[in-house]
């Protein structure tokens, strides 16, 4: 189609997964065109610009529901008011962070001079240290918690929560795979050889059922069409589905983003972790899958209460 961009090309250019693009279409903030349901999606130049707007809003911290409201606004002034309110909030947080930083710097100076040979939890700490520490704690209401004596975890701005349906899936388990890419390539070759369409495909580090070591290889799950029965070393299993917090990254960045996604979940008031493995979903895997492959990370969550 002249002037239109294929979904795979758009996903690669903007470093998003095709699953993310389809999700944006499902909730009505992006549109695609195709001749029938069996054909790949294409995007017009106007919709590519819309995607750029969506990604820009996500980078400044807008939630998907907020983006829906912004695009539904009839007057640009309404969106302007929302951004001005967010800017005022950020300015307030910046002032609080600056004050908190100054307090911490003063605390460091006092600790270096006053606590050289004292216990830090002793009863004889100078009152100024206690007062400054109390003021620093008060500022957390405006700035949030900060990592102390812990590895820095980067902040994710593109996280969505999805209800993943149950699937009947083919499972390939390799207990000695030198890398997850070998497992993905093995499943890709099997699916291609059986001419199976790619609907959903999840991978995860497999936990040892004996409990001797925490991980023992890598599993790949591939959604099966109705009536298809896998044979040999590929078994059919039921994937129960459920609620997942999802973000998009590449395998090159996935370790850091797994930590960041876990931190995101821990900071939520509405969701908590639930038992189950974290999943990695490839939407366009092929034989050249590697560190630059786009992947969705899915962390199992549940609603509080």
Image (cartoon, rainbow, N blue to C red):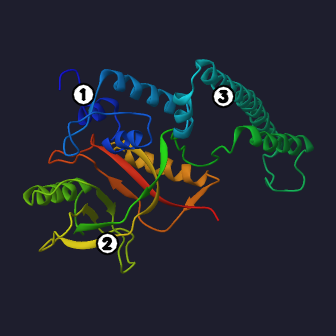
Relative vertical location of residue 178 with respect to residue 37 in this rendering, above or below:
below
Q: Is residue 251 visible?
A: no
Relative vertical location of residue 194 with respect to residue 99 in this rendering, above or below:
below
Viewer-closest of 151 and 138: 138
Q: Give the residue at mark 3.
A: 86
Q: Give the residue furthest to the left.
A: 193
Question: Residue 152: x, y in percent?
Answer: 55, 43
In whole angstroms, how far apart are the C-alphas of marks 2 and 1? 36 Å
Q: Is residue 135 left or right of residue 285?
A: right
Give the quadrant of the C terminus: bottom right
Disc ID at residue 238? 2
Relative vertical location of residue 27 with respect to residue 193 in this rendering, above or below:
above
Q: Give the residue furthest to the bottom.
A: 210
Q: Give the residue at mark 1.
A: 5
In whole angstroms, how far apart are the C-alphas of marks 1 and 3? 34 Å
Lower sequence index among marks 1 and 3: 1
Identify the residue at horizontal 65%, vertical 27% (top origin).
82
């Amino acid at each position: 189609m002249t002037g239109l961009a294929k979904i795979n090309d758009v996903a690669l250019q903007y470093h998003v997964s095709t699953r993310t693009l389809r999700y944006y279409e499902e909730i009505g903030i992006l549109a695609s065109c195709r001749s029938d349901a069996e054909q790949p999606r294409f995007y017009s130049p106007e919709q590519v610009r819309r995607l750029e707007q969506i990604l820009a809003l996500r980078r400044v911290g807008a939630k998907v529901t907020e983006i829906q409201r912004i695009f539904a606004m009839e007057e640009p002034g309404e969106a302007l008011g929302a951004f001005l309110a967010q800017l005022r909030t950020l300015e307030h947080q910046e002032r609080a962070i600056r004050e908190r930083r100054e307090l911490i710097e003063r605390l460091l100076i006092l600790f270096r001079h006053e606590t050289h040979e004292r216990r830090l939890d002793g009863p004889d700490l100078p009152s100024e240290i206690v007062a400054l520490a109390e003021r620093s704690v008060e500022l957390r209401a405006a700035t949030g918690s900060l990592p102390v004596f812990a590895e820095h975890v980067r902040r994710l701005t593109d996280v969505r929560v999805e209800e993943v349906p149950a699937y009947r899936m083919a499972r390939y388990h390799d207990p000695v795979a030198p890398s997850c890419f070998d497992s993905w390539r093995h499943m890709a070759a099997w699916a291609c050889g059986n001419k199976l369409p790619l609907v959903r495909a999840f991978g995860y580090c497999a936990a040892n059922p004996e409990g001797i070591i925490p991980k023992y290889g890598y599993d790949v799950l591939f959604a099966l069409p109705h009536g298809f029965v896998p044979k040999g070393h590929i078994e059919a299993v039921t994937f129960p589905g459920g609620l997942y917090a999802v973000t998009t990254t590449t395998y090159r960045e996935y370790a850091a983003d797994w930590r960041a996604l876990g931190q995101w979940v821990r900071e939520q008031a509405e969701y908590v972790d639930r038992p189950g493995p974290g999943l990695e979903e490839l939407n366009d895997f092929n034989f050249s899958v590697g560190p630059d492959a786009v992947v969705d990370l899915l962390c199992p969550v549940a609603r509080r209460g």
